[in-house]
Image (cartoon, rainbow, N blue to C red):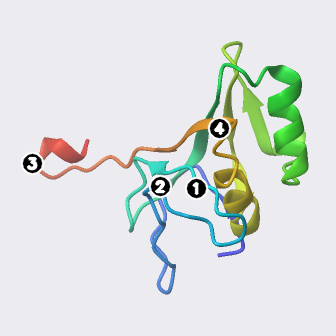
């Protein structure tokens, strides 16, 4: 999938599973920020992005600009948390490589109607 833009869940055939753990990025040997609460078969937007305390408003806006995320692709809270409403694979990979300044990237959770409440 080249562009992720949806407020509902998605399950596409051929969609590659998301790497959720902290892994080495072969491009620059940095750790990738893990994707939290992202199921392999369900990804709900927006993605919530939290920046390190040391990365203020100018820093966080600069990071988003550096990875080519436009202002119309996200909303920002007063607490400095960003809600990314759409993202390309390349943008997400670039964001995940910013482990020095990004504390977390979290998917909106999938809601299940089964009796197992642990997935809610």
Say if 31 sits above or below 90 in the image. Answer: above
Q: Element under label 4?
A: strand
Q: Name the residue under label 2.
A: 22
Q: Element under label 3?
A: loop
Q: Few, some or many C-alpha atoms within 10 Å of disc 3 (few <14, some 14-19, many ≥20)?
A: few
Circle nearer the viewer, 3 or 1 = 1
| Label 1, label 2: how far apart the Cα atoms are | 5 Å
Task: Specify the label residue 102 is tagged with.
Answer: 4
| Label 4, label 2: how far apart the Cα atoms are | 12 Å
Say if 27 sits above or below 97 in the image. Answer: below
State yes or no: discs 4 and 1 in contact (Cβ < 8 Å).
Answer: no
Task: Specify the label residue 115 is tagged with.
Answer: 3
Q: Mark 1 points at which residue?
A: 32
Precedes in sequence: disc 4 or disc 1: 1
State yes or no: discs 1 and 2 in contact (Cβ < 8 Å).
Answer: yes
Circle nearer the viewer, 4 or 3 = 4
| Label 4, label 3: how far apart the Cα atoms are | 35 Å
Which residue corresponds to the image point at 60% horizontal and 44% vertical from the top-left? 46
State yes or no: discs 4 and 2 in contact (Cβ < 8 Å).
Answer: no
Q: Element under label 2?
A: loop
Quadrant where the C terminus is found in the figure: top left
Horizontal and vertical percent for residue 34? 49, 51
State yes or no: discs 3 and 2 in contact (Cβ < 8 Å).
Answer: no
Say if 82 sits above or below 95 in the image. Answer: above
Instruction: Report the side of 66 relative to 106 (left or right).
Output: right
State yes or no: discs 4 and 3 in contact (Cβ < 8 Å).
Answer: no
């Amino acid at each position: 999938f080249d562009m992720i833009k949806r407020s509902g869940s998605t399950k596409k055939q051929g969609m590659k599973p998301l790497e959720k753990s902290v892994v080495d990025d072969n491009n620059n040997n940095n750790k990738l920020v893990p994707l939290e609460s992202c199921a392999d078969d369900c990804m709900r937007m927006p993605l919530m992005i939290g920046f390190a305390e040391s990365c203020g408003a100018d820093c966080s806006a600069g990071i988003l600009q550096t990875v080519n995320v436009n202002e119309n692709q996200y909303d920002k809270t007063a607490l400095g948390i960003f809600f990314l409403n759409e993202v390309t694979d390349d943008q997400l990979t670039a964001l995940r490589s910013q482990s020095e300044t990004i504390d977390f990237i979290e998917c909106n959770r999938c809601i299940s109607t089964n009796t197992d409440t642990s997935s809610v």
